Image (cartoon, helix red, strand yellow):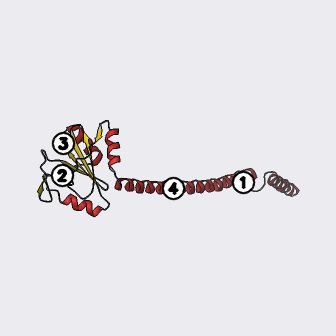
Amino acid sequence: MKRKSTTALILAAFVVASLSLTGCGNTARNRNRNNNNSNNVQDGINNTRSYSQNAADATRNSADTARNATDNAVNAANYTAQNFKNDISNAGYTVTDWANNTKNYFKGKETNYKLGGDAVRLYEYNSASDLEGDINRIAPNGMTINGTDAKFANSPYYYRKGNTLIMYEGKEPAYVDEFNRVYGNPLRP
């Protein structure tokens, strides 16, 4: 019987010694788990900061986009004769002033240019309703304005950009293509 109790005592001592050396549940593994948990928490905090920064950047970008769209709309609405001259000159064409040749077809402030041998008349308006009213006065064939024959040799091309009515009195395909590119399809061919 002594032998069984001695064996049991040795076994118990061995278990106690083993537990004291390794700890309950492997301390090194627990430390790694704790470090991993700490790292995961820190990663979560960093990810949250990153998401917050991305959201703030997206908000700033949206605000910038909206501001640019507003600026572009205001600039398009305030399209002037000088803007026209710059646009056509920058496209590689020669535009010259053509003074003392006003026709006063419309209510807007008239500015005339020569593009090659063709006339281009611009009418700038202070209100969208005045511009729309004048556009509505143009017959579908473009040859009659407010019921009066304008005595054009060819039907002019009419375009609109912002607050300005642009009338091209010519047939040069390169100019028509450029106007279509810059101003879209003509209001009246």
Residue 19 at x, y = what percent? 80, 54
Mark with earlier residue (1, 3): 1
Identify residue for label 2. 188
Horizontal relation, residue 115 to residue 64: left or right: left
Marks 4 and 1 in Cβ contact (< 8 Å): no
Identify residue for label 1. 30
Q: Nearer the viewer, mark 1 or mark 3?
A: 3
- Residue at left offset 17%, top offset 41%: 171
Q: Secondary structure at mark 3?
A: loop
Horizontal relation, residue 177 to residue 21: left or right: left
Mark with earlier residue (4, 1): 1
How many angstroms separate mark 2 from mark 3 (CA)?
13 Å
Name the residue type under label 2: Arg
Mark with earlier residue (4, 3): 4
Q: Height in image: 136 above or below 116?
A: below
Name the residue furthest front. Answer: 100
Mark with earlier residue (2, 4): 4
Q: Nearer the viewer, mark 4 or mark 3?
A: 3
- Residue at left offset 25%, top offset 41%: 114
State the count of labels.
4
Give the quarter of the image for residue 124.
Answer: bottom left
Residue 176 at x, y = what percent? 22, 42
Mark with earlier residue (2, 3): 3
Identify residue for label 4. 60
Determine which of the numbered discs, if any, sits on residue 170 in the image.
3
Q: Secondary structure at mark 4?
A: helix
Name the residue type under label 3: Gly
Name the residue type under label 4: Arg
Q: Residues within 10 Å of mark 3 (few under 14, many from 20)?
A: many
- Residue at left offset 65%, top offset 56%: 41
Q: Quadrant of the N terminus?
A: bottom right
